[in-house]
Every structure is written in C-alpha cells, then in structure tokens.
Amino acid sequence: MTVIYKTELIGLVLLVPVCLLHAQETQPPSPTFEVASIKPNTSGDFRSGTRSLPGGRVTITNLRLRDVIRMAYGLKDIEVIGGPAWIDADRWDILTAAPPGNPDAPWDRMLKSLLVERFRLQAHLERHEQPIYNLVFARGDKRLGPDLHETACHDVDCHRMSVNGSGIKIGTMTGSAQTMAELGVTLSRYAERRVFDQTGFEGRYDFRIQWSEDVSIFTALQEQIGLKLEPTKAVADVVAIDHVERPTPD
C-alpha cells in the first residue's frame, strides 16, 4: 500500500510558484531566540532529549544535529538526507530562551533561524517515496499494554522524553505527557525508518519501553504498550542538506 502525506508547504510551491518570490520578499523576518547557547556534548552518554520550560525556555540535550534539524522543520518526523558525517557523530547541548514577553513564540521556527545563523545551514525540501512504519494497535480489540497510560499531568513541565541505551540493540525509552505523534518521531531514530502515528489517539500519554538483544524494540512495543510498527511505503517530505558548518561553541 502506498500512502501519500501532503503538506501545506509543498502544496503552496506547486500551486502558486509565480507568487513564491514575492512572498519571500514581503514576509516578516523569521523569529529568533533572545538567548541561545550551543556546546558540543562529549559525555559519551546515550541519554538525550528535549524539555520545554516556563518562560519560553527550551533545552536540547545530547542530540545529533540531524535530529535537531528534524525538529526545526515543523516539530514532526521528517527525514533529513545528505550532510557531512559529523552531523551524525557529534552531539550537542542547546539552551534557548524566547524573547521577553513572548513565551509562546514558535520555537521550531526560532530553532530553524538558529541553525541558519550558527550552523550556516542551507537546506531545501524534496518529496520521495520511501519505506516507513505506521504506528498502529497490536491487538484487534485495541487493548493497550501495561506500560502505556493516559497522563494525569497536563502541565508543560510534564512533557518529557528520555532515551537511555546503546541504540537499536539495548535501550529504555520513557515519556511523560507525550502525544503518539511525538512517540513516533522518537521511535523513528531506533526503528531506522520514519514512523507515522495511525492510532487515532489525540491525548497525551505516559509510557515506558525497554528492549534488549533478546527482546527487540518491535517486540517490546507490542508486549509493553500494545502498539506495533506496520511496514508500508509513503511519499513524504525530506529535508536535503546543501551546506552546514560546525558552530563556535559559547
């Protein structure tokens, strides 16, 4: 089965290409962080994640640049292709704060501006057909596993995702107040394909997934949270990197 995922951006390019240049000339400047600090993470720790903090602050801990770029392009799962080897080898800590008086500023757009300014990122969108996974129920009765529960906390401080382990062979993934779409984004790093949520869940959930050399991440998903990854193909956006540079740490 082939699934086609459409985006407003691609539709705009296809439908009104004559207006694109004019739109670029008249659109307001991209929002930027008031404060941003970027440092390489050389701890050797496999744990990584992001946190949204009060006052419009966001922390990114121990992430590869490829994952940071993915987040900047809409806070969704999107494949990033191309680029030098160090964007997968190096890891980064990024601390940011939104402009004063504007804690709800679009931090994905501000993150994209930061990547352009500090990493000299140049990239463009393409559309490719590629193998993907759909995140679906493992059981016909849609019964959930013992380690997935609807969250009792709806405060922004509860929104946490953490992964600890040695990649696809051994790991523990815990999430607090996460959407299924956010779980899919994180799973894509370990399932080695993009993961699209097809559960229909609209709330936020707490979960814990543990996998090992004896219990794969695919088996752990089914046994522990009652979901599974169903292989298929989709035409979807990818971000193609044209240029990027290591930043000066601060």
Image (tube, rainbow, N blue to C red):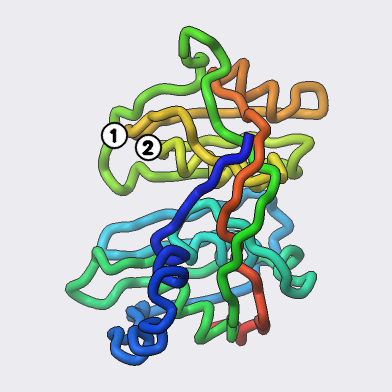
Q: On the image, which quarter does residue 240 sit in?
A: bottom right
Q: Work out which quarter of the rendered image holds the N terminus and state it.
A: top right
Type of the residue with mark 1? Cys
Residue at 69 percent of width and 53 percent of height: 45
- SS for callout 2: strand
Q: Which residue in the structure is indicated by mark 1? A: 153
State the residue lying farthest toward the bottom: 25
Relative to 143, 244 lies left or right: right
- Seen from the viewer's position, the closer of residues 159 and 223 is 223
State the residue lying farthest toward the right: 213
Residue at 59 percent of width and 86 percent of height: 120
Type of the residue with mark 2? Ala
| Marker disc for residue 177 | 2
Picture coordinates of residue 99 (x, y %)? 27, 77
Residue at 54 percent of width and 76 percent of height: 38
Picture coordinates of residue 133 (x, y %)? 63, 37
Q: How many C-alpha atoms fall within 10 Å of the one at disc 1: few (<14), some, or many (≥20)?
A: some
